[in-house]
Image (tube, rainbow, N blue to C red):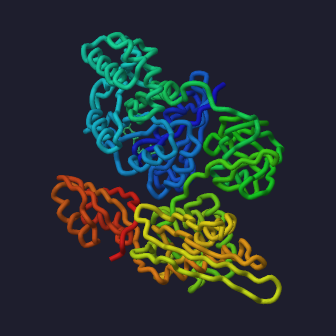
Amino acid sequence: MRVRNLGILAHVDAGKTTLTERILYATGATHKRGEVHDGTTVTDFDPQERDRGITISAAAVTFEWDGDWINLIDTPGHVDFSDEVERSLRVLDGAVVVFDGVAGVEPQSESVWQAADRYGVPRIAFVNKLDRAGADLDAVLTSIRDRLGVTPLAVQLPIGREDGFEGVIDLVAMRELTWADGVLRTRPARSAQALTARTALEEAVAERHEGALRELGNVSDGTLRLALQELTHSGGIVVVLCGSAYRNKGIEPLLDAAVDYLSRPGPGGDASGDLAALVFKVQASRLGRLTYVRIYDGTVRKGDVVWDARGGRTERIARILRIQADRYTAVEQAEAGDIVALTGMKAATAGTTLCTREHPVLLEEPRTAEPLVSVAVEARSNTDVQRLSTVLAYLAEQDPSLVVRTDPETGQILLSGLGELHLEVAVEKVRTDSGLAVTVGRPQVSYRETIVRGVTGFVHRHVKQDGGAGQFAHVVLDVAPLPEGDFEFESAVTGGRVPREYVRAVEAGCREALGAGPVGGHRVTGLRVTLTDGATHSKDSSEMAFRAAGRFGLRAALQACEMVVLEPVAEVTVSAPEDALGAVLGDLAARHGQIINSSARTVTALVPLAELFGYATQLRSRTSGRGTFTSRAAGHRAAA
Ligand SMILES: Nc1nc2c(ncn2[C@@H]2O[C@H](COP(=O)(O)OP(=O)(O)OP(=O)(O)O)[C@@H](O)[C@H]2O)c(=O)[nH]1
């Protein structure tokens, strides 16, 4: 049986969890339909997910469809949990992106779309909630084109609108599919509207696909399907389906399309049979620490001792589990292509490659988002301090976008994450899982520092002579602003004056110096460092000495640069009734927001993140509960 690893991605509330629930029902994996508002879904099994009605942690479910074995990952939609999405994207073969039929492309759908582009994950779109008042497939197609910069190819037309939405016309198989009381009825589609839409679809495909072009005028269903599959992988278009997850309409054709279009055309890649598996998630469970892996090559077997190439240590696989949200089935082994959870791992975390010691490999690690907001967390009782540190460290291991550190000045434990909600959820988890009583300080944003004017020819000499072997390293650095990037390092040293391994050591040292800038000890970003010259001393030079020279040299060079503090900003989109929008605009201005777009009922602004703490509550009161907003990280800008 072929295995496919698919994900569901979307903006918060587009209906991912409901859709996953309906998929499990349609495939016979569950026999009752859970509802988000009842707190009875399979994938939102965490008590906080059920209480808050949102997905916090990506959950995996498995089922069979049409002879294929599918691992499906339901990802969170809220921007604060986007690290879960990134790590899932890293291991997915394809994804269904869900859009709200009324709201169209929303900020977080844009962000996940771009992230999926970065990981090269092919996608199809599902326009959901067509049963809702105001749902409009054409408007969503336009917003996909405008906001995602991709051509939508709708392979279905809706039958009926809003409350009268009954089903879809499948333009590939030319069938009408309607659902009444959970029963699917099909009949051939012969209406003039269907024929016209089919012709338009054939033409749009033929414009981009040679096989379809050759048959233009009479493109066979098989050719059309193959062309759509190939175009889905080559990019530039997205196949669009539609329906209503809540009303259970459009689920089976969506699964068919996912299998048809998201599987990779042509033969698979080369496999050596040697184990290569990437850890993408670590989760505490009642079975202990679960390590989720995607196997790229080879086989994992129960009892195997494997090699963690990044950490340089062995790990033993106690059990291999197939995952059904919070239920697990033990299996003896799992093969390349599959996603399973392992128990028994001691230290492997997201990004670890598991392989064999004889054939070590390092698979590309998922990116980790930088934390933007911090709070001080304190144990109420002095005797709990150590335990709190341990509990937080375990949380951070499960969620790499959470960072725990101790403030060197105050000695307080600082918990940093992607947003207020992220930290709130983490602290709540500490309270409920460990029973610790903690107090939490006010949220603070994480500032950065960057360079306005650099220095050239900055000389730093690291010399130490305290008995034994001395340390000698001499470096000359140019430091320049890098407006569009984080950090770049290059060597312009000629004549082998600094050997290559020492150049690498200087770079490593410079990276260490980025941790704390000269203005306020914030992380330094946006700079290019060039090693222009240097010198060694035959007896006393070492990698360690050059690493120290890089670290202290750059730290001193930064003191000589003109620096500026940056603050995180968010792109906020507020929707409110027309009569309340004036108040919203005034309030955004008072928060130093910069309006970038506004219409009669919505306004989009760039607002410093520090001004957004508590905004949800304040917006509600300012608009008598009628205003809603969404936000996404929009980088950093010079602090006012
Ligand atoms: N009318 C209508 N409502 C829907 C449909 N699908 C989902 N909903 C409702 O929309 C709300 C959000 O649905 P969820 O499935 O929780 O959305 P989600 O995308 O999983 O949300 P997060 O996981 O928190 O990002 C719930 O109240 C659902 O009942 C639909 O097809 N039609």
Left/right placement of residue 52 relative to residue 58 reads left
In the rendered image, residue 421, in percent from the top left (x then y), is placed at 46, 62
Using the image as rendered, state which of residue 30 and residue 59 is in the foreground: 59
In the rendered image, residue 457, in percent from the top left (x then y), is placed at 51, 78
Please identify the quadrant where the N terminus is shown. Answer: top right
Please identify the quadrant where the C terminus is shown. Answer: bottom left
Quarter residue 66 falls in: top right
Inspect this view and state whether residue 573 appears: yes
Residue under the point 57% across and 28% down: 28
In the rendered image, residue 274, in percent from the top left (x then y), is placed at 76, 39
Residue under the point 82% across and 46% down: 358
Quarter residue 454 falls in: bottom left
- 438, above or below 136, in the image: below
**How many numbered tags mark residues here?**
0
In the rendered image, residue 493, in percent from the top left (x then y), is placed at 59, 68
Inspect this view and state whether residue 379 appears: no
- 594, above or below 546, in the image: above
Using the image as rendered, state which of residue 383 and residue 532 is in the foreground: 532
List the single residue furthest toward the bottom: 466
Residue under the point 74% across and 74% down: 542
List the single residue furthest toward the front: 495
Using the image as rendered, state which of residue 589 and residue 41 is in the foreground: 589
Instruction: Give the quarter the ligand 1 occupies.
Output: top left
Residue under the point 59% across and 43% down: 91
Left/right placement of residue 109 relative to residue 312 reads left
- 332, above or below 492, in the image: above
- 76, above or below 441, in the image: above
